[in-house]
Image (cartoon, helix red, strand yellow):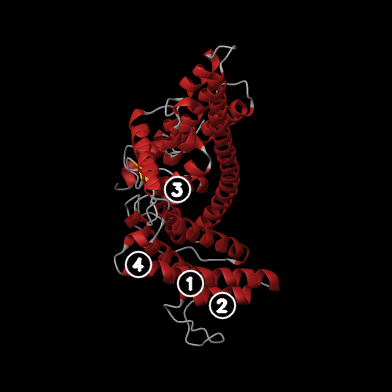
Amino acid sequence: MDKRQEATELVNKAKNIFLDDRSKIYSGLYLLKQVAILLDNEELLVWVNLELGDPILTRSVKKTLEDYVEYVKMKKKKEFIFPKTINGKPFDFKTFIDSGEATQKYSTSAGGFQSIEVVEKIYDTLPKKQSNNRVEHRKNLIEHLAIVRNIALEKTISIHEQLAYSDTLRDGFDFLKEQIDDKLLDLNPVAAEQLMLSFKSMNSQIAEERSQALTTARRFLKELADSIYPARSEKKGERKLGEEQYINRIWAFMDEAIESSSNKASAKSLVDLIGLNIQNLYKGTNKGVHDEVSATQSILFIFQIYIMVGYLLDYLSLPNSKKKRKLNINEASLDELESMLGITRKVAKEIIKFRVITGGITEWNLIEVNGVGKVTSDKAKEIFDF
């Protein structure tokens, strides 16, 4: 079971707890804490830890609230600016106050900044016969617990929806990517490997690696354009079709190859969008400002390229690359791997996919490739350098 599947199961359990007024809130919060850790959700983790009475967090939040109360008393003209973080971690003070939770935390009669587990125990141990003060105390505790339960339920439902939606997208895209990678490896192994390498780097958390992925993506697009619509001197309308106008050449190929006017319009618009994104994203990298290429921009960009290739696949008939054969297994083409090792094309594809994922094949990890046994591994060590 991967982290997302585990998180989904925990979210479902937590949701059932928060929906049942008889269930203890703190038990659901512990489940949410595990979810936050699995999904690397810092904002959720901070909120949950605050509800569970983390002393460092409670001191910091309490101090900010005290400063705010003092500010209100002084009736200062300047707006009070709440910090966006607590101890370097994201925290939404506006929601914390607007929800009424801050009022409950600031009130000792409502349980204050004690953990929700303690607040629930205080509520459970209150005598049935109560004075007016204890009735008020009970009322404040109930309100505090109700607010926390509702907030926890809202967060849980939101996370559940995000997981369900993103899993659907991920499953669909994974299927599309696998189909495209496989067909491109048949049509043009060099271009296919460039696209796979670009996708791998685009998912990196390191901005410089995402920036480098743009260069690889550009190489792929040019390789694709050179294969399907070689450079020429004439124009298509106002579009130049020279060596560096590879986006225009892909656009021109679609204009001529796709018969359906609706499909043609969609595909050509997507190519124009990709061209625009290349210009915008590449401005930062040309200046050396790698951080301008955000993870979201990178992922959307590579999604667009894969979808564009999806449009093209029915019309492509690319010649296999005539790249000069090299005896390094990490530079060998699909055809060279298949013929020299005497393996099926499927296994040859798995070798290329494996070297993209791992960053390179060695004498020791080749045996880990799906479909490669000891005989093939030993043969590769005789034929190739690593």
Give above or below for 367 relative to 166: above
Q: Is residue 311 left or right of residue 215?
A: right
Task: Give percent across and percent down for residue 152.
Answer: 54, 34
Q: In this picture, is 154 found above or below 218?
A: above
In the image, is 122 to the left or to the right of 378? right
For badge 3, the amino acid type reads Lys
Compute the Cα span from label 4 to label 2: 28 Å
Q: SS class of the residue under badge 2?
A: helix
Kind of residue at disc 2: Ala
Q: What residue would you read off at disc 3? A: 353
Q: For the residues marked 4 and 3, what is the alpha-carbon distance in whole angstroms?
A: 30 Å
Q: Marks 3/2: CA distance?
A: 31 Å
Taking the spot 45% from the left edge, 36% from the top edge, the residue there is 47
Mark toward the viewer: 3 or 2: 2
The amino acid beneath tag 4 is Gly
Dividing the picture into quarters, in which one does residue 266 lie? bottom right
Residue position for label 4 = 284
Q: Nearer the viewer, mark 4 or mark 2?
A: 4
| Mark number displayed over residue 276 | 1
Structural distance between the alpha carbons of marks 1 and 4? 14 Å
